[in-house]
Image: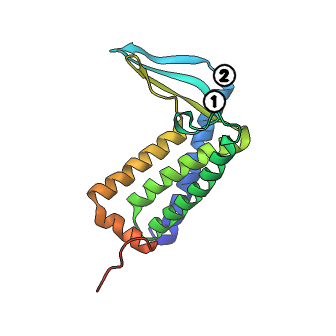
Amino acid sequence: MSKKSDIAFFSFLVLILVTADQFLKRIITYTMELYDQHYIIDNFFSFKFSIDYVVNTGSAFSFLADKSWGIYVLSIVSMILGSIIMLFTLVAAGMGKKFLASSFALISAGAFGNLVDRFTLKHVIDFLRFDFGSYTFPVFNFADICAVVGTLLIIFLILFKPKYFDEFLRKIGVGAKKHA
């Protein structure tokens, strides 16, 4: 693939992931009432998985959910960070760093997916719930999965492929300059 087609592909990938996130959330809102719960796996070795329709006016773990202004702050942060990370996606794609571009695309799609909710609904729709024994993991959504997987891939690159990641950092002017 050429650099231009790589850039187009990763731009399209972000759009597809955001669309998938919004589609899944719409399915939840059209088929369930708020706070409904449908078990998919119920008490398999103390493990439960359910689809729960909940809303979150905050961010991860309901951070800032109790603040009336929190949704606006989170929207601004999501817009800025999502845009910066989208730019990183395009730079990495232009460099031919497809693994890195994929990682950034996932993070950007996660930020934009939840931003659409914050902007249009003033809350984020969450619907995936896992219980492990007496512990209930905070309910999340597809956009959150994208952001977490993308972040884990970046961490993998930093830990196990630092030269690969350093080339990108040098390109954006952050890493140490390479001496001839």
Q: Are marks 1 and 2 in contact (CB under 8 Å)?
A: yes
Give the position of the C terminus as an image quadrant: bottom left
Which of discs 1 and 2 lies nearer the camera? The answer is: 1
Q: What residue is at 54 percent from the left and 64 percent from the top?
A: 87
Total number of numbered discs in the rendering: 2
Which residue appears farthest toward the top when viewing the image?
43
Q: Position of residue 10 (x, y in %)?
A: 51, 59
* Residue 177 point in image, percent of width and height: 36, 79
User: Mark 1 falls on what kind of element?
Assistant: strand
Which disc number belongs to residue 109?
A: none
For label 2, the residue is: 34
**Near-viewer residue (34 or 67):** 67
Q: At 45% from the left edge and 74% from the top edge, which residue is drawn?
A: 173
Secondary structure of residue under mark 2: loop
Look at the picture and state if 127 lies above or below 102: above
Instruction: Indicate the quadrant containing the N terminus: top left, top right, bottom left or bottom right.
Output: bottom left
Amino acid on which disc 1 is placed: Val
Q: Residue furthest left?
A: 160
What's under tag 2, amino acid-wise?
A: Leu
Q: Residue furthest bottom?
A: 180
- What is the x, y in percent for residue 176? 35, 75
Q: CA distance from mark 1 to mark 2?
A: 8 Å
Give whichever of 55, 11 is nearer the camera.
55
User: Circle 1 sits on which residue?
Assistant: 55
- Left or right, 18 with reference to 1: right
Q: Position of residue 179 (x, y in %)?
A: 30, 83
Residue 76 to residue 132: above or below: below
